[in-house]
Image (cartoon, rainbow, N blue to C red):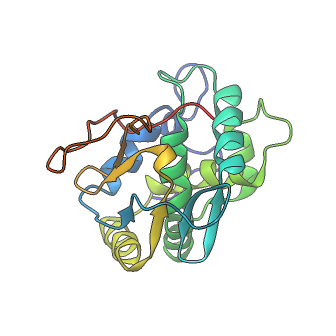
Amino acid sequence: MKAPASGGPSTPAGRPRLLTRLAGVTAGALVATGALSACAPHEPGAAAIVDNRVISDDDVQTATTEVNTALPDLQSKLTTGTTVVSLIIAPYVLDAATAGGHGVSDSQAKQAIAKLANPSPATLQFVRSQLAVSALTPTEQRSVLAQLKKARIKVSPRYGSFNPATVQLAAPLPNWVKRDAGEAPTQSGTGGSTGP
C-alpha cells in the first residue's frame, strides 16, 4: 500500500494514525528479532551504535522532545526507549520502503509534525520511519529483520536492556541494584528510560 502524501489516514484530531500507534507498529513489525544487544556502546554520548553508525543521546532526546511537542495529543508520550529502537531500525525500514516504491520524504514527515517549525534530522528520520513501517509488505518486513539480525547493534544500558523476544527495552536498573544471575529484567513496555 502506498503511503498518501499526508502521511497516512488521520484521526479525528488530524494526527496521522500511524504516529498515534508508534510503539505498537514498531514492535509488531519486528517481533522475535534477536538483533539488538544490551552492550554498552564504546562511544561517549552514544545511545546506540549500529555497525559504525552512532545514534547519539542528544539525537534521542531531541527527537523524543520534538515529537512530543509536535503531537501533544498522543495517547501516551513517546519515550526515549521507543525513540532509540526506532532510530536503530530507521535506515533499514526507509531503504525497504524506498525499494518497494513507498518511500516517505522529508516533506511528508514535516506535514505529519506540522506544529514543529524546524525539526531536527533525527526527528525527521524517526517520523519518516514510523510512516514507512506500516507500508512495508510482509516480505519487506522479513528483509528488515534479516538485515537487523546481521547488524552489530549495541545499546547503552542507560536505556535498559533489550529483550529480543519482544523487541522492547526493559527498564534499566539503578547502578546500586544487582540482578541475580538467573533473574530476567522486568518489562517496562516499549519505552525504557524517559529521562535524560
x and y, in percent, of residue 19 in the image: 53, 37
Quadrant assignment, res 48? bottom right
In the displayed structure, 100 sits above or below 137; it is: below
**Residue 173 makes an appearance in the image:** yes
> Relative to the observer, which residue lies in front, 70 or 194?
194
Task: In the displayed orientation, state which residue is furthest to the bottom.
Answer: 150
Classify the position of the N terminus by image quarter: bottom left
Quadrant assignment, res 42? bottom right
Task: In the displayed orientation, state which residue is furthest to the right.
Answer: 117
Quadrant assignment, res 186? top left
Classify the position of the C terminus by image quarter: top right
x and y, in percent, of residue 160 in the image: 42, 44
In the displayed structure, 26 sits above or below 96; it is: above
Q: Is residue 126 left or right of residue 96?
A: right
Q: Residue at the location (51% across, 67% down)? A: 97
Q: Residue at the location (31% across, 71% down)? A: 142
> Relative to the observer, which residue lies in front, 58 or 88?
58
x and y, in percent, of residue 36 in the image: 38, 63
